[in-house]
Amino acid sequence: MPEERRKVTLRTLFSKMHEGLPITMLTCYDYPTAYFMERARIDVLLVGDSLGMTVLGYDSTLPVTMDIMIAHAQAVRRGSPSAWLIGDMPYMSYQPSVETAIRNAGRFMAEASCDAIKLEGGAGVADRVAGVANMGIPVMGHLGLTPQSASALGGFRVQGRSAAQARKIVDDAKALEDAGVFSILLEMVPDRVCELITERSSVPIIGLGSGPHAHGQLLIFHDMFGLYPKFTPRMARVYGDAGQIILDGIKQYVEDVTAQDFPQRENWFTMRDEAFEELKVLLE
Ligand code: KIV
């Protein structure tokens, strides 16, 4: 069993921010990975709708539903009882109305024991953020590259390189803060824009591909371990090639079964002679 630790709370996150200690955050989608993340004492886990791409193999996050998200969030919570767990609101689970947003945010809390939810967008979703936050559900904002709007943003690319675009992101961050977010994720914005927003923010800023100045860092788990076959984004650091280990193991298994080298005696179960004799009589 992992060594127990105290539950990560909002207090923990704000203390780290005020003490200048970086907040650690990863995406997580299943029980065994969550178990290891708990052992590694990660602060924050995001059950991201990126699972549509990393786990389910879609080309975008758009097909992901609330029911899919809830099942994965439940598994992650079972593996990691003490991380601060954020459920990512999938496409159209909050866009239609404030009420839709509150209902779906509530599902993450009630059905998957999440601590918070995340949703994408700036001033345009400030009323959803306020609606959910006012119901006592902590909300993380998400600016910069927001994958649910990839089509409108011109693809999965850096956002905020021009002064005008950067100004919009800075303004959006302020709008989210005013609406009551507990934290903001900045995905793929230039380091200087991230620094500027971090300096002005009263809530923790978490960066993904946005440089070193944020209060914390997020990576997508599959990018860290060679588990997303289509590509590894530049913003990721690769910590190991689990994909290669898995591929080698599967190839070896295919070879072993074909060569009748598997299973061996220690891999199967047998029954006592008397029971087997009795079975044969029963079958006569
Ligand atoms: O779904 C997700 O994992 C995310 C990250 C890309 C930030 O939203």
Image: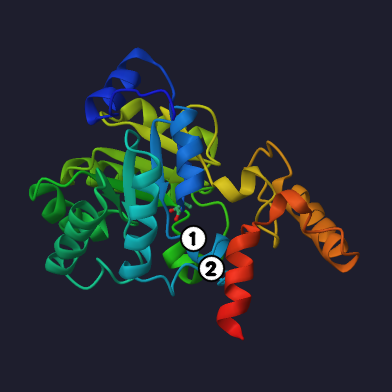
Amino acid identity at mark 2: Leu
Q: Residue 232's mark?
A: none
Residue that numbered label 2 is attached to: 56
Q: Is mark 1 within 8 Å of ligand 1?
A: yes
User: Percent position (x, y) of residue 165?
Assistant: 44, 52
- Give the distance between the C-alpha atoms of the residues marked 2 and 1, in whole angstroms: 6 Å
**Residue at image coords 54%, 67%:** 154
- Secondary element at image label 1: helix
Say whether marks 2 and 1 touch (CB < 8 Å): yes
**Residue at image coords 34%, 23%:** 5
User: Percent position (x, y) of residue 124?
Assistant: 25, 60
User: Percent position (x, y) of residue 219?
Assistant: 53, 42
Residue 284 horizontal side relative to residue 199, left or right: right
Up/down of 226 relative to 217, above or below? below
Name the residue furthest left: 135
Q: Residue 51's mark?
A: 1
Q: Nearer the viewer, residue 39 or 184?
A: 39
Identify the image quadrant of the C terminus. bottom right
Name the residue furthest bottom: 284
